[in-house]
Image (spheres, rainbow, N blue to C red):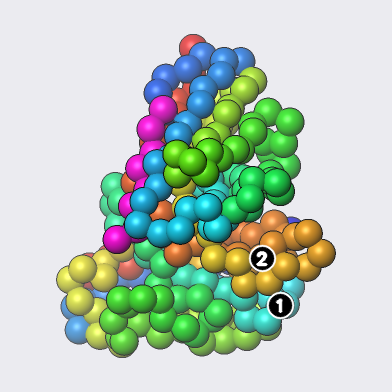
Amino acid sequence: EIVLTQSPGTLSLSPGERATLSCRASQSVSSSYLAWYQQKAGQAPRLLIYGASRRATGIPDRFSGSGSGTDFTLTISRLEPEDFALYYCQQYGHSPGTFGQGTKVEIK
Amino acid sequence: EVQLLESGGGLIQPGGSLRLSCAASGFTFTSSAMSWVRQAPGKGLQWVSTILGSGGNTYYADSVKGRFTISRDNSKHTLYLQMDSLRAEDTAVYYCAKVVITMLRGAMPFYYFDYWGQGTLVTVSS
């Protein structure tokens, strides 16, 4: 089973700043099969990115994904108030698919 | 608009059984694989089980294999999770999620989740 380690655990930033979230896999993720999800308090997760870099339907272009192999990054170019939330990565190139433990983006 | 509405959660004693339901609308349910994903209080996400559109192939996390059964009724556009022999560690919010399969390797699908329901809370406690 692939273990995903997300860092940092918490990111404290101000609106308008750039956020860079990391997701590192314990082994190479096939075909960049990596997704990112956003979860706000008391809500269900929402798909942001799949295939490491493809934005899901309706996701603003301030969200971007990059990376391959074992190192992946989610970047939020300019934080909006609604972006402060929990973010999870998920690999689906190996069975079973697994999630990272999450990164919380909080208001500084 | 895709909608997934879970129901059936509640408080149950260890060793008990519970059946969760997920009513789906807004997409072609019969051809869509579906999953259950859970989240223990204050914890991260854990995949539980997946069923393909036909209902013929099912997959389970090791932690629930032999205790949980996923099924679907395509005529009712409804997904189910029968949970038996429940344990305290099964306490979680259970989400129903629509699956996007990107690859099939043999009979094994590889996928992510493009829509999620709001979840239903299952609490296993005496």
Look at mark 2 in the image and give the residue it sits on: B110
Q: Mark 2 lies on which chain?
A: B
Task: Check the image and report above or below for A71 versus A91.
Answer: below
Where does residue B28 sit, x and y in percent of width and height?
A: 46, 58
Residue B119 makes an appearance in the image:
no
At horizontal 57% and vertical 86% (from top left) the residue drawn is A67
Where does residue B46 sit, x and y in percent of width and height?
A: 56, 49
Asked if residue B4 is among those painted magenta in the image, a careful observer would answer yes
Picture quadrant of residue A92: bottom right
Picture quadrant of residue B112: bottom right
Which SS does the magenta portion mostly show? strand
Task: Check the image and report above or below for B125 versus A41.
Answer: above
Do callouts 1 and 2 mark residues in contact (Cβ within 8 Å)?
A: yes
Where does residue A77 sit, x and y in percent of width and height?
A: 31, 87
Picture quadrant of residue A80: bottom left
Viewer-proximal residue among B35 and B29: B29
Characterize the local packing of mark 2: few (<14), some (14-19) or many (20 or more) Cα atoms within 10 angstroms: many
Look at mark 1 in the image and give the residue it sits on: A30
Range covered by the magenta-colored residues: B1-8
Residue A49 makes an appearance in the image:
yes
Q: Which chain carries label 1?
A: A
Asked if residue B2 is among those painted magenta in the image, a careful observer would answer yes
At horizontal 68% and vertical 28% (from top left) the residue drawn is B67
Where does residue B45 sit, x and y in percent of width and height?
A: 51, 51
Residue that sits furthest to the right in the current view: B106
Q: What residue type is labelled 2?
A: Phe
Spatial CA distance of label 1 from label 2 is 10 Å
| Badge nearest the viewer, 1 or 2 | 2
Q: What element carries label 2?
A: strand
At horizontal 47% and vertical 31% (from top left) the residue drawn is B20
